[in-house]
């Protein structure tokens, strides 16, 4: 199990650029990103499970907030980690082809959709009752691909179609940019939404770090 390394490389560059982090640097079979935030100092990202490289990372890392990210089987990753390491909530590396990206956002009644241009692409916002943000998400345009990121809905506005509207609006923006397709990393809850829209899971996306 794993993902095409070129896709993961593009995704990693988009992730870093949208967060003003340092560009990824090549590290063995994957990439290293210096994030520089208190809750995340850095991350190692790998497109597949390489036992020797993972052993190299866990030997070098001695503090929390440095994350290991692997496209692979969670149990196999867990078996390679020392006891002080823990798996974080599951993730899923997903893809969609352009043939499934053109759908009307279908905005719920009483909501409005706006876009905010960003240096990396665009931010979509669904608002309610004036300027109350109900949902938002980001599209990063990276090397001919559309990377979808930080899709979120506030608790009071869930199960009303806001997240679906955000995703469909961003998908249309991606099509206008003539992307080759879309990629994202989903949570457990997000995966259900994206699969209902035609997205395909390519691999589990495992996150691990030293506890604390």
Image: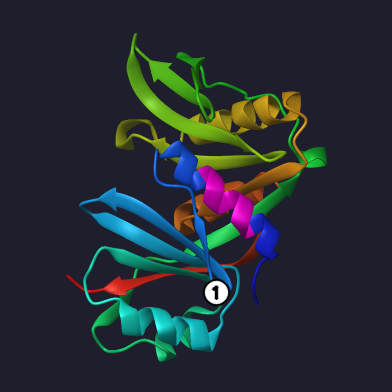
Name the residue beneath numbered marker 1.
28
**Dominant SS in magenta:** helix
Give the residue displayed 34% in from the left and 59% down from the top: 42
Residue 52, compared with residue 191, is above or below; it is below
Question: Quick one: 201 or 109, which is closer to the camera?
Answer: 201
Residue 1 placement (x, y as % from top left): 65, 77
Quarter of the image with the C terminus is: bottom left
User: In the image, 19: left or right of 204?
Assistant: left
Question: Quick one: 72 or 153, which is closer to the camera?
Answer: 72
User: Residue 56 lies in magenta, yes or no?
Assistant: no
Magenta-drawn segment: 8-14
Residue 28, compared with residue 78, is above or below; it is above
Residue 204 placement (x, y as % from top left): 55, 69
User: In the image, 106: left or right of 91?
Assistant: right
- Under circle 1, the secondary element is loop
User: In the image, 23: left or right of 8?
Assistant: left
Give the residue displayed 56% in from the left and 80% down from the top: 49
């Amino acid at each position: 199990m794993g993902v095409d390394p070129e896709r993961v490389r593009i995704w990693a560059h988009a992730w870093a650029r949208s967060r003003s982090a340092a560009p990824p640097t090549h590290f063995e079979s994957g990439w290293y990103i210096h994030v520089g935030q208190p809750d995340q100092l850095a991350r190692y990202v790998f497109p597949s499970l390489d036992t020797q490289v993972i052993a190299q990372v866990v030997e070098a890392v001695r503090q929390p907030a440095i994350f290991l990210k692997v496209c692979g089987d969670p149990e196999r990753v867990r078996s390679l980690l020392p006891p002080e390491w823990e798996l974080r909530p599951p993730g899923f590396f997903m893809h969609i082809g352009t043939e499934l990206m053109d759908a009307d956002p279908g905005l719920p009644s009483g909501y409005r959709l706006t876009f905010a241009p960003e240096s990396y692409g665009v931010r979509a916002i669904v608002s309610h009752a004036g300027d109350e943000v109900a949902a938002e998400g980001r599209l990063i345009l990276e090397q001919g691909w559309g990377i979808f990121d930080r899709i979120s809905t506030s608790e009071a506005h869930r199960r009303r179609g806001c997240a679906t509207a955000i995703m469909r609006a961003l998908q249309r923006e991606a099509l206008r940019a003539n992307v080759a397709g879309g990629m994202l990393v989903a949570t457990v809850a997000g995966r259900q939404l994206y699969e209902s829209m035609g997205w395909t899971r390519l691999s589990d996306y495992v996150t691990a770090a030293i506890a604390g």
